[in-house]
Amino acid sequence: MPASDNRPLIVTNARLVDPASGRDATGALLVRNGVIEDLSAEANPAAPDGAEVVNAGGNVLAPGLVDMRAFIGEPGFEHRENIASASLAAAAGGVTSVVCTPETEPAIDDPALVDFLMRRANDDSLVRIYPAAALTKGLQGQEMAEIGLLKAAGAVAFTDGAHTVTKANVFARALTYARDFGALVMHHTEDPTMSGGAMNAGEFASRLGLGGRSTEAETIVVERDVRLARMTRGRYHAAILTCQNSLDVIRRAKDEGLAVTCGTSINHLSFNETDIGDYRTFFKLAPPLRTEDERLNLVEALSQGLIDVVVSDHTPQDAEQKRQPFSEAAHGAIGLETMLVAGLRLVHAGQIALPALLRAMSTRPAELLGIAGGRLEKGAPADLILFDPEEPWVLDRELLKSRSKNTPFDEARLQGRVLRTLVGGRTVHRAA
Amino acid sequence: MTAFPHRHLLGIEGLSPPEIVALLDRADEAVEFNRRADKHRTTLSGRTQINLFFENSTRTQSSFEIAGKRLGADVVNMAVASSSVAKGETLLDTAATLNAMHPDILVVRHHAAGAVSLLAAKVDCAVVNAGDGAHEHPTQALLDALTIRRNKGRIEGLTVAICGDVLHSRVARSNIILLQALGARVRVVGPSTLLPRAVDRLGAEAFTTMREGLKDADIVMMLRLQRERMSGSFVPSVREYFHFWGLDSEKLAYAKPDALVMHPGPMNRGVEIDSVVADGVQSLIRQQVEMGVAVRMAVLEALAGNLPSGKNDAGF
């Protein structure tokens, strides 16, 4: 990541939205030497000498997004995505920190690979890249990875990506061991023995003649995991939850005071199973899209703060992997560039307040990962986004920055546009 | 010398502090005896000692064999792996068979916790537990205590850090009980995956980092990590284990400057302990082996005193 610009920058006449402090008011913000030097409740305070002045015109200035789950292709899948393309997509989408999943080739289960990724990111990325490392060696779910050495090398969390650790003793020991290092364990909660189907189990799958994946396959794992989190007192994060039954388990765990948190993906907040329509594979996801009722449950839980985190679950797939019969097509959708505007749909629909959305996309993930950012406060890194929440536009997937174009938002009418993204005070994206 | 009021030695649990001290005093005398040129006594003359090892252990078995022979016993080593047990005989059938041969002392090691006391209930002779599963290894704890006492002059008030695979260690359990009985403060140090649940209820203070666990320790007792537990099941790898919990000079410096290092052996150099430390001036590891023979002589003699028509304590 390039060094920050030395010239101070002041954003005036902005709507400052900071979920951490609860601030949502007009003001100005001064950036110098890569950090937030000052905040002002005055819309147009005097600018320091030589400062670049950006008049926000009442648009929103907020902490940059922190995406806890994105696949960025390196090493091994550079044809689907690479660090440079992922970082362009992130910057354009207002994501200033990206946690990359370890499901690469080879998997990120060795401290030398964490080091490699961080060096590559330093050279190629406009945004901050934080490696998540494998929880088990080779993502095989059999033996725990070198959690201590990986964390010392820079891994911010431990996960087997979209693999669920089925062996309870392996997962329990990994949670226990990770606790000694204060390491966060993120888990994909789908029992693989019940997850052979291509979409949500139910009427729609029956009509389409597709195998189903039930919500029970998810909740069974969440229930087990919470019991193990209680037993081990480890730090547990359910990566992507999709149904009320799972959320109920998490709510009870939180009420009990366990170190348990959860997330969902922007896709599961945006779509339901009927969006699959005529076998549209860009809507084939793991876990699958659920019913509209479940989508609304997720939105409600997000608004209450029960869901801590919203991720892009950015999963680039090349055309060959998606131009397949639905049951044979690869899972996943890209999302770095669209997660904010997709979230704004919920805001415009009156289903969630903007600060609550930004908390789950920025402040909470930063807290859980123990990284700087996610807040507008003096001394914090100037990882910032300036966006117009109102501007309407229609998405053309060919214009997206990612190397893969498998977006479920193609031709969607969206409202809200990122005008400018700063990472460490440096402008890494500016709307054309 | 105080008579030893137990027929068997199945564990440290159940021994009173004066009984432990009496065994250590007796062993102290045996140490001097063992350094003489003439190392033969007749305390166990005419007695038959069978070493019954269901789990291989060259050093412990040799130590018991030498101890028995120096006391004049007829010592028989049963190679269990190639015996009737391998042909499917149950533990209790083996016990009945051996009992019919009228041994006086059985020294038993078994891979299952509780197996030695199960066997002891079925035989007429004295039984010494030479290690049962992850339960107890009383003569190891006694020899460790003797080593500490001879080097530090006392046990009471010392801080002893037992480090590594406490979960699977019978040595750790016996030591936790014994050292506390004699007034030491016991800590256990290791990754949580290798610490027994509720270990604090056994009276030991648990630490997961060497820096905290070794702070101000007088004795650093390292435990062996079995090979099959090194590669991901309990700890991720040898290099990670050594990095965080292997005893090297840097970590030993967290302890008191005059701290002493112990290891029950056999050591995995470069896994739980660095050679520089194992062979360094603070190491008592060689001394522990010497104390082993003396402690086992003391135990055999104490038990012999309770055998029918046994000679009374002769002392050394």
Image: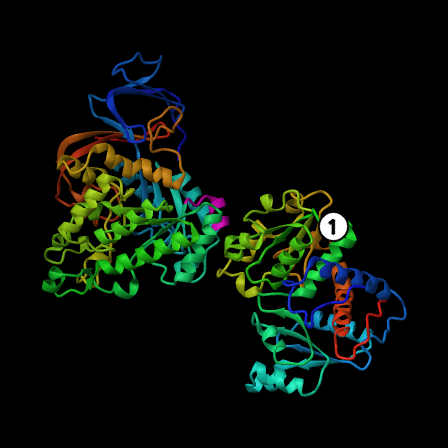
Instruction: Work out which quarter of the rendered image holds the C terminus of chain B and state it.
Output: bottom right
> Image height check: is A256 above or below A64?
below
Left or right side of B234 for B288 = right
In the rendered image, residue A416, in percent from the top left (x then y), is placed at 17, 33
The 10 Å Cα crowd at callout 1, few under 14, some 14 to 19, many 20 or more, is: some
In the rendered image, residue B86, in percent from the top left (x then y), is placed at 58, 84
**What residue appears at the point 58 percent right and 69 percent down from the top-left corner?**
B133
Mark yes or no: residue A141 visible.
no
Instruction: Work out which quarter of the rendered image holds the N terminus of chain B and state it.
Output: bottom right
Q: Nearer the viewer, residue A178 or B109?
A: B109
Type of amino acid under label 1: Gln
- Residue A150 lies in the magenta-colored region: yes
Residue on which disc 1 sits:
B282
User: Is the magenta region chiefly helix, strand or loop?
Assistant: helix
Residues in magenta, as a range = A147-156
In the rendered image, residue A9, in percent from the top left (x then y), is placed at 33, 20
